[in-house]
Amino acid sequence: MEALRSVCRGIDRISQGFAWISDWLVLFAVLISAANAVVRYLFSYSSNAFLEVQWYMFGAMVLLGAAYTLRMNEHVRVDLIYSAVSPRTQLWIDIVGFAVFFLPVMIYLTWLSWPFFWQSFKSGEYSNSPGGLILWPAKMLVPMGFGLLTLQGFSELAKRILALEGVIEIDARYEKPVQ
């Protein structure tokens, strides 16, 4: 069981690292957006590359930060039944949800999105916009983000199983008090 806990901690650290990158991308996107506006108004110059970099960063923020959001149990959910049942039943609901729904879908989306990226990478695909950027880095974020969600899903499933065994404790409440 200790090996499984170590794997979970490792996956959690990976998700936290990508969340840290995602946090910084917010700042960079804001700075690029502001710089683009200043350059456009002061020098009457703009480039589609600035706009494309912004949407690359937005995509990276969402896709790289999603696994950490899952780790923190902050994704939107409707818990009509979940909040009314015992913590043990909540663990079982999570286990079934991760094993039957979440992980198969994430694995499929990772697998499905890989050729989308790979074809773009092999062909050196560029944006059709004048001054556009290469597209494969943005397309790489899709399988990468789903892959990170898959890893974090395995970690969350394992943690629920460890909690059922009494090895760890999990606070499965969705809306936790602000710390």
Image (cartoon, grey):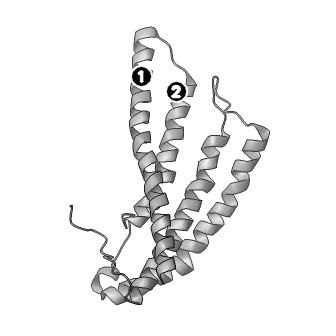
The answer to whether the residues at label 2 and label 1 have Cβ atoms under 8 Å apart is yes
Packing grade of label 2 (10 A; few <14, some 14-19, many >=20) is: some
Kindly indicate the quadrant of the structure image that contains residue 106.
Answer: bottom right
Q: Residue at x 52, y 30 (%)?
A: 51
Q: Residue at x 39, y 85 (%)?
A: 167
* Residue 121, x across and y down, in percent: 73, 43
Q: Residue 28 or 163: which is nearer the viewer?
A: 163
Q: CA distance from mark 2 to mark 1?
A: 9 Å
* Residue 60, x across and y down, in percent: 51, 46
Identity, as a three-letter code, of the amino acid under mark 1: Ala
The secondary element bearing badge 2 is classed as helix
Q: Residue 136 or 13: which is nearer the viewer?
A: 13
Residue under label 2, please give it: 50
In terms of sequence position, does the residue under pointer 2 or pointer 1 come before the other? 1
Quadrant of the image for the C terminus? bottom left
Report whether 93 appears left or right of 139: left
Residue at far top of view: 43
Q: Residue at x 37, y 65 (%)?
A: 72
Q: Residue at x 25, y 68 (%)?
A: 176
Identity, as a three-letter code, of the amino acid under mark 2: Phe
Q: Is residue 164 above or below residue 48?
A: below
Residue at far front of view: 2
Residue under label 1, please give it: 35
Q: Which mark is residue 89?
A: none
Counting every numbered tag in the picture gives: 2
Q: Is residue 168 above or below residue 50?
A: below
The secondary element bearing badge 1 is classed as helix
* Residue 77, x across and y down, in percent: 38, 69
